[in-house]
Each structure stands twice: as C-alpha cells, then as structure tokens.
Image (cartoon, rainbow, N blue to C red):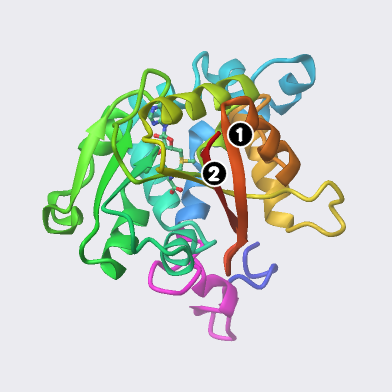
Amino acid sequence: MLAAFGIFRIDREGAITHTSRSLLLRTDVPNSMHYGARSWTVTGSWRAWEDLDAAFHGKVPHEVAWGTGRFDYLRRIPDEARIFDAFMANFPDKRHSVVAETYDFSKARLIADIGGGNGETLRRILALYPATRGIVFDRTDVVAAIPRDALAGGRITTHDGNFFDGVPADADIYLLIRVLHDWPDDDASRILRSCRAAMQRDARLLVIEGLINPDPCYGSPTEYLVDMQMMAMFGSARERTEAEFRELLNSAGFDLTSVIGTASPVFILEASLR
Ligand SMILES: C[S@@+](CC[C@H](N)C(=O)[O-])C[C@H]1O[C@@H](n2cnc3c(N)ncnc32)[C@H](O)[C@@H]1O
C-alpha cells in the first residue's frame, strides 16, 4: 500500500527500497516526518480522532475517548508522553532554530520558556547567546525526562509546575511557544495572566504560534490540520488569527507590540505589559 502511494519502491526482484518520501521517515533528514508519524498515529491521538464528532456536541473528543484530559493522559502513559515531547522538539516547522535566529535575544539575561517541553528552543537560543541563561518550565514528568547533558552545561535550569498556578519570576523574556493553541480563550487568558504576574515592567512576552488565515485558500494547510488536532485533543482549543491573539493579549493586560514573520510557519508576537 505504501509503495502504491510512492512511499517505498518494490523492484523487480521484490527488494524494497527508499523513495524521496520514505526518506522523510528517517530521523537524520531535514524536516524529518519521523516524529510526527509516530506521534499523530499513537493510540492516544488516534482514538481521540475516532470520537471527533463529539466536538459537534460541545464535548472534547479526547475526553470522550479516554475519560480524561490530554495532559493527564500523557502523565499516566510515559511512553506516549516521550513520543510527544520528541515530536514537539523535532516538529517539521523548524520553529526552535528559526526563533533563535530571528529574534534579537542579546539583551536577555534570563529567558523563561513556559510549557517549554524538553528545552529545544532554549538550547538553540543559548547556543547563539553565550551570556544568556534559561529556565524551562513544564509539567513534572516532562522536565524530569530532560537528560542532564541537554541543559547547556548548567545554563538551563528546570522548574516543574502548573502554569495555571504561577510561573517563575524575574526573567527578561517569557516564551509561550505553541502553548496557547492547546487551550480555549478563558484558559489561555489565565496562562497569560500567570506570566503577567511574574513579569517585571520591562520584561517581554513572546507568543510564538501559527496564525490562521480566515480564508483557507490563502492559509498554510498545516495550520488547519493542527487546528483539527486541537479540536480532537482539547475541544474548543484552536489556532487563532492575529486579531484574535491581539484581543486575547489585551484581555490579559498586554499590548501586542510587534508581529514578526519567520522562515517557519510560526510568527513571533511580541507583547509588553500594558
Ligand atoms: C504543544 S506543547 C509545546 C512545547 C514547546 N513549547 C514547543 O514549542 O515545542 C505544550 C506544552 O505545554 C505543557 N503543559 C501543558 N499543560 C501544562 C501546565 N498546566 N503547566 C505547565 N506546562 C504545561 C506540555 O507538557 C507541553 O510541553
């Protein structure tokens, strides 16, 4: 079947060989789809999609399928959680390296990556800014799984916690990368308020997300697929337009100061305290 779709080729002797598409399933190629193929088809995600129609009745497909929320499920099933973390760190949008290369972090002494997964963005930024330190803040099992040798020689520290309760104080820059799209507006606003409470007056918040175009004819197809994945996993969580992010930030006491396009599908939305 895969050969029929041009993924693998079967030669006259019956030997199975690579094609340019199957090579994308390897880990050692640019824009590898390996991690995405594993994460999107793993049982937790697959079963939630089977209940997608629950979303039309105001329910959360993942909760209907599994009787619990997505992140609680991941906490209970470590194998799938680590597949998800690896997918985030190796997402084929190259967002981690692109963010490090695009934004000027030179004045930042300390950067806090909130919901920072396994710390890939901070490793990329700190590699370019040797005087900067970082905090990766995420759920307990996620930060516990980060190997010591992935902490940039001690320049990255890990903090576990729940961003609805609060986040570490005193960083110069706060990052929220592909975090808000996991949450409906009320919860997204609570996460923003947690950041706001931790920030000094001159600190900056960078919300880094895809921006969905209201007209799909002009948008990036991946963003609509991610939007559906958010519906399957989190119900009314979703991708947002620039105007929706502006409104969300305003509701939590921030001003959107600039929107920076990148070489990845993600945009950097820079915000300061109002
Ligand atoms: C879509 S992933 C994005 C990861 C990373 N920022 C990136 O761009 O690769 C969302 C992250 O939010 C974290 N998260 C979810 N709920 C959380 C909570 N209540 N407190 C802290 N982190 C949480 C998840 O564990 C996950 O690492």
The residue lying toward the viewer, choosing from 69 and 208, is 208
Q: Which residue is mark 1?
A: 249
The residue lying at 26 percent from left, 53 percent from top is 109
Whether residues under marks 2 and 1 lie with C-beta atoms below 8 angstroms apart, the answer is yes
Q: Position of residue 33 (x, y in %)?
A: 51, 62
142 in magenta: no
19 in magenta: yes
The residue lying at 61 percent from left, 44 percent from top is 256
Residue 179 appears in the picture as rendered: yes
Crowdedness near tag 1: few (<14), some (14–19) or many (≥20) residues, C-alpha within 10 Å: many
Q: Which residue is mark 2?
A: 271
| First to last magenta residue range | 8-34
Residue 27 bears which disc, if any? none
Q: Position of residue 183 (x, y in %)?
A: 58, 28
Q: Is residue 212 left or right of residue 41?
A: right
Q: Give the residue type at disc 2.
A: Ala
The residue lying toward the viewer, choosing from 32 and 14, is 32
Q: Is residue 209 left or right of residue 244?
A: left
Q: Position of residue 59 (x, y in %)?
A: 69, 15
